[in-house]
Image (spheres, rainbow, N blue to C red):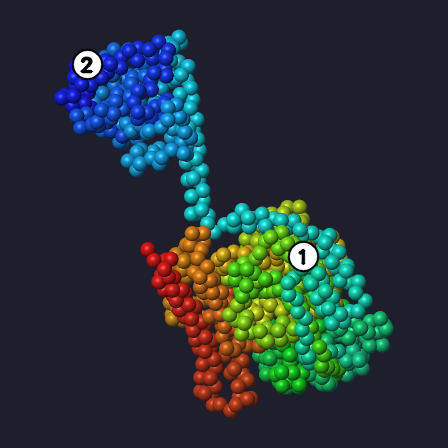
Amino acid sequence: MGKKRKKGIRPEEVQQEMTKKVRQAAPDLLRVRQGEPDLLRCRSTSRSPWIDSGRFRPSTSLPGSLETQDPDHIQLSICNIMAYRKVCDVQGVPLEGEVLHCSQDMDLDWDLNKEELQETGPSIERMQMKHVDCQRSDPGSDPHPELMEPIQPSVSVSTHGRFERLQEDPDYVSHFQTRSPGHKGHRRHQCVMLRYALAGVGGLILGILVGWFSHTSSVSSSLPSPESSDLLEELLRRIQADKINALQRSFSSQSDESEESRARYLYRQWVGLGLTDVRISNHTVLLSLPGSKPNTITDKASHQCFLASGFQCDQRKPRDVKKQQFSYAAYSAAGSVQGEVVDVQYGSVDDLKRAKENLNLTNQIAAVKLGRAPLLYKLSLISDFGFRGALLYIDPCDTPSGQNIWHQAFRVTLNPGGNPDIAGTAGSLTSLLVQPISALLAKILLSSPSKEQGTCTPLAMPPNTERKKITLTVGNQLSYKKIYNVVGYLKGKKNPDRYVLVGSHHDSDQGGGTSAIMNQLIEALTDQTKRGWVPDRTTVFCSWGGSVLGNIGSYEWGKDNSVVLQSSAVAYVSLNSPVRGMETLRATASPTLLQLTTDIQKRQLLSCIRGGNCPGPNVSSLQLPGDGSFFANLLAVPTLEFAFEQSKAEESTSFLSVAQFATESPKTLDPLFNFHETIAKMTAEAILRLVNDPVLPFNTLDIVLDVQNKLKDQNAASAALLSSASALRDHAAFFQSETMRSANDPKEREPAHLRMLNDVLRDLEKSFIIPQTPPGVHRNLLYSLPGKTPQFSILKFAQEGVLHCSMTSSRAVKHNSLNKESLCLSAKNLSQSLILRAIRSADSLVCFGLELFENYPSFRK
């Protein structure tokens, strides 16, 4: 035995004692070979449940010297030796010889990691093996592994089970098959192996699951929780086209179509649907309404009188009176003016300059197309060039294909927003007499050769054509009336003082579909609260009055609550005109919400209502029409809107939405209300994300990329602008990666930290509000005007402003040529200075956020 002793395992001085102990145990070992495996248990008071159960786990080194061990410990070591001997015996190795010597061809590291085996020489026989101290337990006990004492740090733990690692040996199967079929320990070994295999597989699966979930939480921590996903799916299931149709029928069945009646109806509906706090308010405002007689245009040469539609006055039928009165420009000057019709096309500075080269424009009447620039901006230029009246029309070549507007007149409002009486303008917001007309009447007045059918030819007055002299009569009347707003609250729990606004309107000739969608959203959301869901932030549902005459209701309510909204409004979700066609799904959003809006649109388009023939995402940050204008333009509240349009808006047609045609019923536009359902679902998802996400779904980098994109034109951007934009991008990228990403980790979601972070995200757009812009242009620089080359709106008009300034400044103030040029160039430089100040302000806010969170306790390393 001494001849085969492994060097380094037992000291020489205890060899005789060890041999004696083994010989004493020999009778028991013989009985084990004869079929009495229970005698494998050591007769010591320190029995191990691992040994008793056949799951012995040698994982620590054998004692270096048995002389230093007490007798019980020596007995335990003999127990370990016997366990090893049993395994060797099972594998068919002769019992004689060295007790710890097993077949070299078999890897018996058990739960040892291979790097923990200590080799004292090149031969595998010179390994040192490890053991585990037997734990005290009652005889025969076999506790569940989870109830056992924790493994000490020195013990090697592997995600692989013992027999899984044995199976890694390519010779394992052949070794197993070399056993004698009649071996008396065969059945016990199979049981032991099966138990080890099950334990190993269980450990492997547990390790995989723990690793998977820890990896998922670190990589995809920003994804909605399963509860949020289930909530969204349940919310979307409750929004159905049939329900919206029923709500629309109920809304349309009201006999009293006055605004007050509609507002009170909505009030009762919202209270019944379960909103906790619903309020109805009114404002007395100055409205511009059509007169008792339709506005007319009379040709002085032929004495023919035309209505706005193009039909002659004596051809008017009684049923057409209301329709003809609908065609007017609210807040236009009233009276009559005579003058020649001058073709100024789209009313740009270049168009006006060409017209001025040929004739005197003072007190003339301009025929101007809608499109390519804001209406109020065009009218301001026309007024500055000396015109006395303006006829507005839409060129048929600018309208979607298949839409015939030749005989359709329309309504516009010249009110940029709010109650005009407050401004002290006595109701007229321009000195011009403004009248919308049909394309048919424009063709007659311009003597244009364009045809109603066939190839589209833009309307234009042929060269050397005698201009018609006309009399324009506008009979608008001013009247003080009350407009009504309905506001209801769905209170949040964690941040009840942070508001997500959802706005629609209930005007008698523009409501209906929007109110039905709003009611469906309220019903779906309150149903979830009845099931136990409580939103994080408060949702404020708003139905505005006076929208079609200049968003009066939203402006007045917004100004009354501006102090609270500036510090507490998170976002505005618009339902201004959700279904105005059935061809193109379009989304408009501030840069902060571009990513969220795109994600929602992609999700909904996967099940689009046209059976797979779905358009791609169409999201932009153009100026928002409707009631969202106040919140986006004056308060810089991030805003988004989903809508179906007749066709994709192009550069020349993007401003046509200011034209309000006689509305078609929602049933006519969308008979099955499928388009209404799609918009409602997309809006519901946006609301849920905005009120529920711990970190607001805002993207700082989208703002920075939008700024840099607008500065691509090197001629319009100074070196200071480009440098500041680059610095903002660097800081915003660091802010988004280091601050926002860590905040999305549930472990870092301390309420105070999240609140500070969300406030920085919310306020970033406020840096881009400037004091003054040209008429019709948003004060929020992040909203751009349509065009093939994106740029800041005030820079887009900078070149026109210089030309306009040089041509008109002499009429207002007397300047010599040098002073005039200096004055105009300073206006251009002022625009760049305002943009530079906005970028630097945003950069300062981002840097403030970085410093704030760097010093925040939870961020300290």
Determine which residue is flagged by label 2. 1
Apparent side of residue 161 relative to residue 555 in the rendered image (left or right): left
Apparent side of residue 811 relative to residue 211 in the rendered image (left or right): right
Secondary structure at badge 1 equals helix
Q: Residue most toward the bottom?
A: 814
Q: Quadrant of residue 291?
A: bottom right
Q: Which residue is drawn at 26% across and 21% down?
A: 78
Q: In this view, does 834 lie above or below 335?
A: above
Q: Is residue 283 above or below residue 568?
A: below
Q: Which residue is drawn at 41% across and 18% down?
A: 190
Taking depth in this image into account, of 742 and 643 the one nearest to the observer is 742
Q: Distance between the residues labelled 2 and 1?
A: 87 Å
Q: In which quarter of the image is residue 374?
A: bottom right
Taking depth in this image into account, of 414 and 843 the one nearest to the observer is 843
Residue 784 visible from this viewpoint: no
User: Counting other residues with Cα less than 10 Å from the Cα at mark 1, is it few (<14), some (14-19), or many (20 or more)?
Assistant: many
Residue 59 location (% of width, % of height)? 29, 29
Q: In this view, does 776 lie above or below 663?
A: below
Taking depth in this image into account, of 206 and 854 the one nearest to the observer is 206
Q: In this view, does 11 lie above or below 711?
A: above
Secondary structure at badge 2 equals loop
Residue 555 location (% of width, % of height)? 61, 74
User: Counting other residues with Cα less than 10 Å from the Cα at mark 2, is it few (<14), some (14-19), or many (20 or more)?
Assistant: few
Determine which residue is flagged by label 1. 523
Residue 714 visible from this viewpoint: yes
Apparent side of residue 363 relative to residue 122 in the rendered image (left or right): right
Amino acid type shown at disc 2:
Met
Q: Quadrant of residue 676?
A: bottom right
Q: Which residue is drawn at 56% across and 88% down?
A: 811
